[in-house]
Amino acid sequence: MVLMVNSLTGFGAGGSGREFAYVTSSEISGTASTFNFGSLSLGLPDTDRLIVVSACYDSSGASVAPVSLTVGGVSATKLVQLVGAGSGSSVWVAAVPTGTTGNVTFTSGGSETGCAVHIYRLVGYQSAAYATASSGTGNPVSTTINVIANGVVIAGILIDNGAPGTNLWTNLTENYDSATIGGSAGTTAASALFSTTIAGQSISNNNSGGAPIQQLTAVSMQPR
């Protein structure tokens, strides 16, 4: 089963040429090692467009590291990953200058019971992350990440074991919230544009269902 949500929201930095937007999310439930989400919205084309993808996945057994992710036939670079017992989270980036849509395919190193991807569009940003962070501290899950002025933080979580409930992010704006991956798991994604440089910006998520496992990965992207 594939579930897809489109919601183009974001920010432009007045006259700077920088653009940032959450574009869409999609989920697949069902056992597989490769999840082909089909053609997803990527937003408007641009010669300087980056597509950042948060990919979260669930397993009935021990999860293994993700192998690859492609966007519109372009191989994405993995910026950060967190692999836990039965679940995992990762963030990827690809330069995809053309097309308003593109096929998105995620491949794991083993069999998973579901996967979700969260798509973000950036223009005027470097493909190398300014900083990355990950945490599997349970509920609430929290971490810190360095941010730079006019930089963007993008984060995704795989929520496992029990009723996922709703999610309350701190210092990021929630873009997506669902409880359907693999039957007993959910996912949420959030992001924010920061106007100033901050060392050790805290980010966290509190799950109302008290989920004992949350796998969070985040990236801080820097402007050109």
Image (spheres, grey):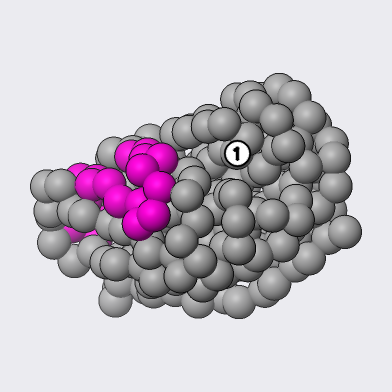
Against 31, residue 118 (above or below) is below
Q: Residue at x 46, y 70 (%)?
A: 208
Q: Position of residue 83 (x, y in %)?
A: 53, 30
Q: What stretch of residues is rendered in magenta?
A: 133-151
Identified by mark 1, the residue type is Ser
Q: Is residue 204 left or right of residue 46?
A: left
Q: Position of residue 201 (x, y in %)?
A: 18, 53
Q: Residue at x 43, y 53 (%)?
A: 155
Quadrant of res 171: bottom left
Q: Is residue 136 magenta?
A: yes
Toward the viewer: 139 or 224? 139
Quadrant of res 40: bottom right
Q: Can the viewer see residue 139 in this picture?
A: yes
Q: Position of residue 195 (x, y in %)?
A: 19, 66
Say which element carries label 1.
strand
Quadrant of res 113: top right
Q: Residue at x 53, y 32 (%)?
A: 84
Against 111, residue 30 (above or below) is below
Q: Can the viewer see residue 70 in this picture?
A: no
Q: Is residue 105 left or right of residue 52?
A: right
Against 112, residue 198 (above or below) is below
Q: Residue at x 38, y 64 (%)?
A: 206
Toward the viewer: 132 or 186? 186
Question: How many C-alpha atoms fall within 10 Å of the one at disc 1: few (<14), some, or many (≥20)?
Answer: many
Toward the viewer: 141 or 5? 141
Q: Is residue 10 magenta?
A: no
Q: Position of residue 215 (x, y in %)?
A: 48, 44
Which residue matches tag 1?
Answer: 87
